[in-house]
């Protein structure tokens, strides 16, 4: 009695689809790695990054001005920027909840601790730049141009910005911190007076 013929291991069409999906995944991974590499190279160039963002923001403002529309998109963009700004100005750990006490130096041996943001500068730049890019692309689609009386939106945003910044500044004053670090500092302690300086023994 002869053995039955061997059955083929798989469907050629299915194998082609699997190979195509694998190739697409590899291409996506390669593009993402290259994109991440470019972002990593721009990290130390703070001034150039913000100059590029300023150009992008200026182009968006000019386009909205000449189109005389897309005010709802601009309002949503402004709310998102305000949310990012709060994270940029806030410390990583809320001083009201900190259990270690003050972070400022109190003795000559203490070293100054730099301000650590809840939202780091690079992530702040990346998020706000991406938001402007998305908003700029949306201005090419009339579906996002919703008719609205723009002075009301501007008034709402100004009021919200004023109240939010007032609360943030009060928090900074209450817990005595500044959301910027100017170099490496050390606690100098109390300087000796002139009388104490002259009374020191001379070898």
Image (cartoon, grey):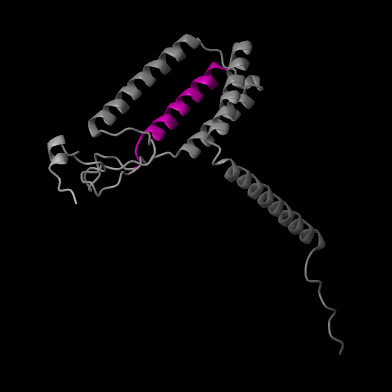
Asked if the stretch drawn in magenta spans residue 194, the answer is no
Residues 142 and 99: in front is: 99
Q: Quadrant of residue 163?
A: top left
Question: How many numbered markers are drawn?
Answer: 0
Residues 164 and 175: in front is: 175
**Residue at screen point 23% across, 42% down:** 102
**Residue at screen point 79% across, 64% down:** 11
Q: Specify start and end residues of the magenta stretch as a single range.
A: 70-92
**Residue at screen point 71% across, 57% down:** 22
Quarter of the image for the N terminus: give it.
bottom right
Query: What main secondary structure does the magenta stretch of the protein show?
Result: helix
From the viewer's perspective, is 2 left or right of 98? right
State the residue lying farthest toward the bottom. 1
Expressed as whole percent of the image width and height from the top left, the position of residue 114 reads: 35, 42
Residues 71 and 143: in front is: 71
Expressed as whole percent of the image width and height from the top left, the position of residue 107 reads: 21, 46
State the residue lying farthest toward the front. 203
Judge whether 107 appears above or below 159 on screen: below
From the viewer's perspective, is 118 left or right of 188? right
**Residue at screen point 12% across, 37% down:** 195
Expressed as whole percent of the image width and height from the top left, the position of residue 188 reads: 25, 41
Report if residue 19 is visible in the image: yes
Expressed as whole percent of the image width and height from the top left, the position of residue 173 reads: 25, 28
Q: Quadrant of residue 26?
A: bottom right
Q: Quadrant of residue 89?
A: top left
Report if residue 130 is visible in the image: no
């Amino acid at each position: 009695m002869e053995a039955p013929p061997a059955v083929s291991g798989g469907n050629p069409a299915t194998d082609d689809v699997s190979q195509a999906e694998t190739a697409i995944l590899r291409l996506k991974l390669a593009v993402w790695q290259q994109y991440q590499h470019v972002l990593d190279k721009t990290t130390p160039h703070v001034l150039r990054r913000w100059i590029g963002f300023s150009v992008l923001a200026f182009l968006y403002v000019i386009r909205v001005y000449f189109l005389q529309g897309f005010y709802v998109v601009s309002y949503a963009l402004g709310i998102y920027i305000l949310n990012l700004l709060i994270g940029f100005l806030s410390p990583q750990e809320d001083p009201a909840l900190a259990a270690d006490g003050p972070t400022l130096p109190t003795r000559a041996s203490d070293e100054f601790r730099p301000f650590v943001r809840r939202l780091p500068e690079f992530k702040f730049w990346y998020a706000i730049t991406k938001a402007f890019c998305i908003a700029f692309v949306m201005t090419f689609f009339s579906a996002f141009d919703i008719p609205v009386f723009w002075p009301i939106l501007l008034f709402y945003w100004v009021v919200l910005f004023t109240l939010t910044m007032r609360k943030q500044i009060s928090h900074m004053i209450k817990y005595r911190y500044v959301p910027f670090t100017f170099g490496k500092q050390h606690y100098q302690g109390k300087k000796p007076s002139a009388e104490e300086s002259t009374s020191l023994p001379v070898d």
